[in-house]
Structure formats: structure tokens, C-alpha cells
Amino acid sequence: MKRFIIGAVAALLVLTVGTSSANGALNVITATEDLASIAREVGGDKIKVESLARGYQDPHFVEAKPSFVLKLNHADVLIVIGRDLEIGWLPPLITQSRNAKIQQGADGYLDASLKAKILELPTGQITRAMGDVHPLGNPHYWLDPENGRRIAQEIRDKLSQLDGANAPTYTQREADFERRLTDAEKRWTAQMAPYKGLKVVTYHRSWPNFADAFGLDVIAYIEPKPGIPPTPQHTLDVINAMKAQNVKIIMVEPYFDLKTPNSIASQTGGKVLVMPPSVGGLPSASDYFKLFDTDIGMLIAAIKETGAK
Amino acid sequence: MFRLCHIVRGLFIAALALMWTARPSAAQTPAAAAPSAQQTQAAADLRAELDRLRSEFETVRDSYGARLAALEAKLAALNQPAGPPPPEAAPVAQAPAAGTQVQVPSGAAGAGGPEGQLPVYGNVSALSKIFNPDMAVIGNFIGAAGRNTVAPMPALRLNEAEMSFQAIVDPYARADFFLAASPDGLEIEEGFITFPTLPGGVLLKVGKMKAQFGKVNTMHSHVLPWVDTPLVMTNLLGSDEGLNDSGLSASKLILNPWVFLEATGEVYQGDDSLFKSHKRGNLGYVGRLRGYRDITESTNLDLGTSIAYGHNDVGPDFTTRVYGIDATLRYRPLRRAIYRRFIGRTELMWSRRGQEGGDSDAFGMYASGEYQFAQRWFAGVRYDASERAADAALKDKAGSLLLTYWPSEFSQIRAQYRRTAYAEGHTANEVLFQFLFSIGAHGAHVF
């Protein structure tokens, strides 16, 4: 028995030796590619950025793979979307990371939603009878350029706090990002202006901030309730609503099955758009700017094709 | 004021207790046909004593009532948002409702004690419920049909209600409690504190927990891919609960450029369904080495080897060792993660059990596969074979087919056809079915 204990202690000591070597640049891990893109804009070459989830993956259902533990183990900063989006996979990864810097509440943990404009905050009693509701509001808030700016400011402040020497760089880069984003937003708003009030159907409630920013009116969802797969009755209701209001556009996130959307489209003369809600959702949406370029380009092409209003 | 409430409440309780003790003697008196003179005398003494106590209580109550009134007036004058005057036996939580500060009790002021605002230690605040842990209850209802004379299960049974309480303790630790209520009683399934940020990158857990031995042993019943547990759990790890004991667990990542590698060492009290501690020094030990690697973004391989050692129930000089190897292959395409997945898993275990007349070596294993073919549907298959730890000549075998339906993430309905060939020569054909349902906030599980 003594041998066993001594052996175990010796083994642990040996293991302690092989720790990772530090490197100049701040190591930033983000939950999603949207945050990675914004962090890259702010941090430039002063930081290394990597996202855990891919843009074409449902961010609610990411697997808590041990390989993510390794990434979190050498992270200096962890940036999360928050609002319980990652509740199903991130907390055990943080616990297992053995990294004091990024534990919830530590300096290296940044919840990007704290200053963002959050929609669909539930009022009154909520229950699971409403499906997979988010009690802290809709977590898909990054799809509004205004929130892009607010996220960038949060990231600037966090990076400056942890890496004071490069604070001027972060401030300058963030200001530059805001300027470019505001210019781009003017362009996007102008592109969408003729279609203000456009009625659309979406699969999941991923688009309230996007709809708010660009004047869309989401009249129905293909999911009867968040996280609940389509039912025949609800699908029929959606078809009827689309016919009644002459809705032609169905926006579907890349991680949902297209069977129901396609059947709805064939019965209503509508068009299914597989639109990326995140950076990396499609190869063309390779950064935060191109995400909006892609989405707005797809929407306008579909409007012209279907004559939707 | 806080202390005052306590005193008033204490007196009230004391008075109640006295009334209660007084009542039976009063009730006895008419019941007794002819009370002796001695008894009557005793009753009279008691009554006198009671009267004396009552008057004393009234005096104290009056004096405290007066002080209470004075204190309230003082508080009102201070324009403090004080709660309503506490009735007798007021609930304790009421006192510090105004925030995290409490007034120094009036008696203490000027007596050399602290003056002004006192901090409230712990969580005593009207807002304290925001610090409540995440709570959930998971019901596990199991039904069985068919014939099994060796290990029969009840036809219908709420097998377990698992209650979980999970929260961050302080900046250094988090705590997880899992209580399992079953027809056999309430049991602490797990209850441990985790220190995730110790120097040297060690993750330390202290408490009662499922030992990191293989895969099935670490799983709660509601995350198992089957209704039952494989035969090897009962045959070689003592019961379907497996190794679950009080102790310490330390694990560390072995960082290298190629794979995820994690080493775990655990020390236990040495008293669970497999091990028996005959004296304090008879501890149980578990060690595990786990490797993991992403093969592609959708496919990954998880390999582990484990060892468990402890004394067994034969006697203080007899020990049991179990060695295990486990492998899990997972496939889950990222773009269709909610519709498709495959998990293949197997565990092999070797047990060496010391007993009278020499060691008994037994081997057991299972292999299983689950395939998700629609958003809510899973099909599964499992093969089991295991010798029994105490007598390796007895070997049980089983095969199972499974179908699982998920109405949502929070409930699950499962059916399992199981054919078991027991070593005794009996073959059991059974259909098991299960309803699992979860309410509340249940933390995510470790991969």
C-alpha cells in the first residue's frame, strides 16, 4: 500500500514538470467564431485567437470535447457569448481546464453580453412548456452591428486590462474597427432600406437582433417552440400564415434539416435561404463584416428573385 | 434586534414545551380511577411550578416587549427601512432584510462593543435566493416484463429520483451534490467540492463521488445509454452502483503536442459495494490514465486504462484488484449535430479477488453501439459477458436491443429488449422500459 502511495505521489510530481511555456502574445479563446473575428479586429497581431465552436455548428449543442480542455488550459482570456448560450457545454470545460485565469469571475473570463442590447428578455413566469427558452434573453445578439461595436469595446477593455503595454494599440484598433463597421452598416442599411418591413419566416429564433437592425418582420418560426422539432400542425399553420401574408423568404441556419423548410417553400412558392448566423457559417462569411455582406447579399438576391415584400 | 428575536422565540418555544408536558398530566388525572394522595400532591406541585414559570415568562415578555417597542421607535427615528415588528417566533430571515448591514443591538452600544452597522456574514439577505444553487430533480421510472428468476426487477417502479444541487462555492471552488431517493431510502449519490485552480494544474475533488474507473462507473443512471447497467458492473464491481465512496481525487493533464492525456489518482475510505474496510488503514485506491484525440472534427477516439485496489469482504488479509481498459469512438457531424451521431463503446475488466484457497481471477466486458437516426430517435445494441468475481467458473452473458425517443432535451422514453443467459442455466427474456424526466437546472455533464 505504501508503495502505491509513493508511486502515485511520484507520478504526480513527474507530471507537474511538463507544463506549457508562455509566449508573448495573449492567448484568447472564444466560444464562437463571431467573437473570434471581433477579437482579431481589436487585438491584431498582439493576440492569438481561436474559437471553440465552428460557425456552421449549432452553438447550443457543442460537444464538450477534451481537446477543448487543452485549448482552455493555456488560454489567457476566454470570451463567451453568455446569456446561457453555452450552458450545455462550457461550464464543465472551464472546471476541467485547470486554468485559474479563465474561471467564471476571474480576470480572464469575459462575458461579451454584459453591455450588449439584448432582446426577447422574458417577462413573467417562464417554464419549459415554452420549449428551450433562454431566461436571460435571446443570446443571438451579435447579429446587430451596434452590438458588434459594444462587444469590441468590451474586448478592448479586457485586453487593455490584461496587457497594459499594448493598450494604445487595442484602443486605436478598436476605434478603427468601429469606424469601418459604422461605414459598412450605413451601406447595409441603405441596401435594405427599400425592403423595410419585409416579412420572413425563420427556423429558430436566431435573428431578432438582425431583424431589428435591418427592418425585417419575422412572422413565424418553423420550430413550434425553441428547440422543439417541427410538427405537422405547426408546419401547416406556418404555410397558411405565409400564404395569407404573401411571405416568400424562409431563413434557415446551416445546422438545421432542410426537409420541412423545403416542403413549406414548395407549397408557398417561397425560397429557402441557408443563411449563416455566425462567422464561418458559410465559407463566404469569413469575418464579422463578410457575415453581414453574405446575409444581406443573400436576402436581396432572394427578394429580387421571389418579388417578396 | 436579531438577538432579541432569538430570545423571544426561545421563550415562546420553552413555553410551548411546558404546555405540552403539562397537558398529558392533566389528561391523565380524570383517566386514573382513583389517584393516590401522592399523585394529587405531585400534580399540585407541578401546577404551582407551571404557574410560577408562566408568570416569570410574562414578566420577561413584558420587559422585552417594552424594549422592543423602544427599539422600533429608535429605528423609525433613524429612518431605517426596518421590517414589520417581529411577531413572537418571527422568521429569522426577516431581520437583515434591509441589505447586508444590521444595526448593533441596542444593549451592545456603549458597552465597549462595536457600534453602528455590522456586516452580515454568510448569506443572510432577502436577496440570498439569487445565490441558491442550480437545482434539478430527475425521475427515473423503470418497468420490466418477462421472466427473470436470478435478478428480477419490479414490474413498475420509480427507481430513483435524483436531486442535484450545484453551485460555485467561492472564487476557489465549486460544489456538486447529487442525492438519490429510491424505494431503498435516501442516499448521497455524490457530494463533493472541486478545486479547479490549484497550483501545478491539479484538479482536486474531495467528498463522496463515483470513482474514475472506466466509463460506466462514472455515469449517473440518467446518462447511461441503457435502462440497466452491463453485467460486468454487478459481477466485477460489486453492484450497479459500482465504485462510489468517500475520498480524494486528484487529476492532472499531461501536456504534450499530440493527445489529450489525463492522469487521475484517488484515495478512498475503502468501503463500498466492492471493497470492505476492516480497519482505518484499509483504504481503497483508484488510478486512471485517459487519452483522447480528435481524428476529424466529427470523429474522436477516447481510450482509458484504470486500476482499483482495496480490501474485500473475505477478511482483513484479502484484497481485490480490478484492472480495466475502455475505448469510446464517437462520430457526430458538426453541421448535423442535432440529427446524427454514433457512439461505440467497450470496456474490458479483469478482477483478481483474494479469498480462502487462493486468488480468483475473473474477466468481464461489454461492447455497445448507439446510433441517432433522427432528431429525437436513437437505436442501440449491447453485448455483455462477465464471469463472477468470486467464482470465475460462473459466466453470465447477455444481449440487448434498444430504442430511445427524446420528446425534448428534458425527457426521454426508452425500451430495451434483453436476453440474459445466466450461469445457473436460466435464460431470461425481458423487456425493460424507462421514462426519464428532468425539471430544474441540471448542470452539463463531463464528456
Image (cartoon, coloured by chain):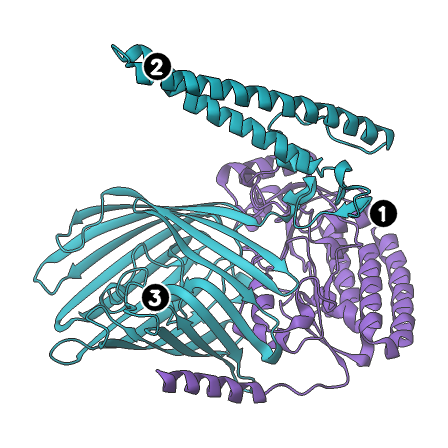
Chain bearing tag 2 is: B
Alpha-carbon span between mark 2 and mark 1: 101 Å
Q: Is residue B373 left or right of residue B434?
A: right
Residue A217, placed above or below residue A83: above
> Is B170 positioned to the left or the right of B422 in the image?
right
Q: CA distance from mark 3 to mark 1?
A: 67 Å
Q: Amino acid at mark 1?
A: Pro
Chain in purple, by letter, is: A
Residue at the spot x=67%, y=88% of the render?
A: A21
The answer as to whether the residues below labels 2 and 1 share one chain is: no
**Among the 4 quarters of the image, the one containing residue B83:** top right
The reply to whether callout 2 and callout 1 are in contact (CB within 8 Å) is no
| Residue indicated by mark 3 | B243
Q: Which residue is mark 1?
A: A194
For mark 1, name the chain.
A
Does residue B336 appear left or right of residue A56 in this picture? left
At label 3, which amino acid type do we have? Leu
Give, as a three-letter code, the residue at label 2.
Thr
Above/below status of B193 relative to A76: above
Q: CA distance from mark 3 to mark 2?
A: 63 Å
Image hue for chain B = cyan
**Residue A243 place in picture, x, y as percent:** 64, 36
Asked which secondary structure carries label 3, the reply is loop
The answer to whether the residue labelled 3 contacts the one labelled 2, judged by CB atoms less than 8 Å apart, is no
Q: Chain of mark 3?
A: B
Q: Nearer the viewer, mark 3 or mark 2?
A: 2
